[in-house]
Every structure is written in C-alpha cells, then in structure tokens.
Amino acid sequence: MKKERETLKRQIRFSHTYRHLRVEKLKQNLYLWFVILPLFIVLLLNYDKLSLFISEFVRNILSTVIPLSDMSIVSSSFIPYLGDIHYISLPTAIYQSGLNLITLLISVLLFIFVSTGRRKGHPFSIFIEMGLFVQIISCIFFLFASNDFPYTATIYSELYIKQQISLWLFFFVIIGLVTVLLGSGYFVYNLVFVLKIISYSFIYGVLRYITYLFIVSQISTIYMATLFFTLGPLFDFLYITYFYGRYVSRIIEVNESKESEDIWQW
C-alpha cells in the first residue's frame, strides 16, 4: 500500500493554472519559413499548371458522358504576373420548366419534413434546411425570370477554379497560423495535419468540380446556387474545422502524457 501511494504521488502533476506550453521561437520560425511558406510559394507559382492538370483530368472524365468536341480548355487572367487560370468551357443545360416545378415541390415538402418533429433544430437538419431554402428561392427565380439568369456552365466553371485555387492558398495561411500557435514540439503532428488537409481538399475539390459541371451542363442550372451555398466554400471550412478538431485532440493527448513533461514550462 505504501509503495502504491508513492507511485501515485510521483505521477501527480502541477495544476494547469501554473503551466504553459514551452515556446521556442526558433523552431516556430523554422516551421513557418521552411515548411508552410515554401508550400505556399510552390502553389502560388504553379497554380496555372495545377489548374491545367485538373482541367485536363476532369475533361477526360466527363468525356464519358459529354462529347469531347463540346468541351475545351480555356484560360483567363487571375493573379497579375503569375499566370492565367485554366478551366473547362462546356455547353449549358437547357432550362426545363417542368423539372423546375417538380424540384420546387419536392424542396418545399422536404423543408417541411426536416424542420418539424424530432428533426427540428438538429445540426444536420439545419444544414439541409439552408440548402433547401436556397433551392426554393432559386426555383422561384427561374419561374419568373429564367431568361435573366446571368451564369452559364462555362462562367460557373471559371468561378469554381478561381475559388478553389484561392481557398488552397488561404488554407496554407490558416494552417500555418493555427499549428504554430500550439507550441513548437509537434513538427510531425503539424506536418501530418497539413498533408491531411491538402490531400483531402484536393481530392474533394476535383470530385466536386466533376459533379458541378455534370449537373449544370447535363441536368439544369437551377441547382447552381444550391451547390455553391451548401457544398461550396462553407463545406470546405466545415471539414477543415473537423480536421483541426482531431488535430487539437491529439495534441491534448500528447500534452497530458508523461512523455510530454519537457514541453511545459512552470
């Protein structure tokens, strides 16, 4: 019993009130200047090649359902002196009033369903409600002003690629800040976090581009606004928040472990 008490006593740590993470500015600067910044610069100087690669890949995938002759890769200016952005030009789906009315009816019924009963107020229900609300507004707009809709599939394609490249550049800034602020003893965890975010965002971004172009080119543009406001930038920040939460949870586990005593200052 005495031996057990001594063992337990040796494992007791000081209160969180009197400790803080050890800050080593040299390591933090090395991480920012030699990991995050180079990755940011590589993307900044090569986004034209990356957008061309994505466009060629997506064009080949879509050629299974859209004639290759109907699609071409075009470019437009993006960041001055750093190169153009490449994207796919393709035909726009013809507006169908019948499809619009059916979509409007289904959207209203689904909105009533997810906003009532035990589903009301649930986070997922709120997300669905937001998307359905946008879809209802979009359908009403097309009922009365379908000829005034200003966006084509090609314009949407251009805006999407510019948005995606901008998000990837912004992600490097955000990732660099949130990882370096948690101390300097987690290089491996930081690197894994960065690779997870970039890998997932790239794969998701390409698959989303394929899906978007197929819908607005082959089905209807009435879904364009809903796609943007539900699975667009908002969803990007949702999954980056998820990955960041997992990253912080892992850092907390490391901080509370016995092996982490050297990262604290008292």
Image (cartoon, helix red, strand yellow):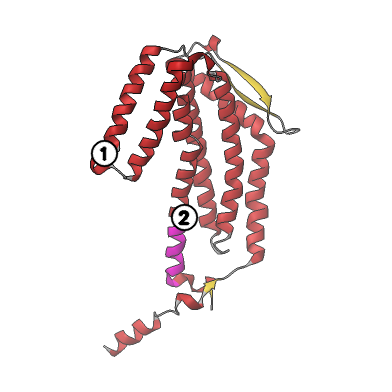
The answer to whether the residues at label 2 and label 1 have Cβ atoms under 8 Å apart is no
The reply to whether residue 87 is visible in this rendering is yes
- The secondary structure that dominates the magenta segment is helix
Residue carrying label 2: 247
The residue most toward the bottom is: 2
Between the residue at mark 2 and the residue at mark 1, the CA separation in whole angstroms equals 35 Å
Between circles 2 and 1, the one closer to the viewer is 1
Tell me residue 229's x, y (percent). Answer: 47, 34
Q: Which residue is drawn at 26% across and 39% down?
A: 116
Q: In this view, does 185 lie above or below 79?
A: below
The residue beneath circle 1 is 116
Circle 1: residue type: Thr
Q: Quadrant of residue 5?
A: bottom left
Vertical comparison of 254 with 219: above or below: below
Picture residue at 36% right of the left edge, 36% below the top: 128
Q: Which of 39 and 3 is in front in this view?
A: 39
The residue lying toward the viewer, choosing from 263 and 167, is 167
Nearest the eye: 149 or 64:
149
Task: State the residue at coordinates (68%, 30%).
Answer: 78
Q: Where is residue 124 in the image (x, y as percent from the top left)?
A: 34, 42
- Percent position of residue 53, x then y: 59, 27
Please provide the residue range marked out in magenta: 247-258
Disc with the residue nearer the chain's start (2 vs 1): 1
Q: Can residue 64 be seen by looking at this rendering?
A: no
Does dot 2 land on a helix, a strand or a loop?
helix
Is-magenta flag for residue 250?
A: yes
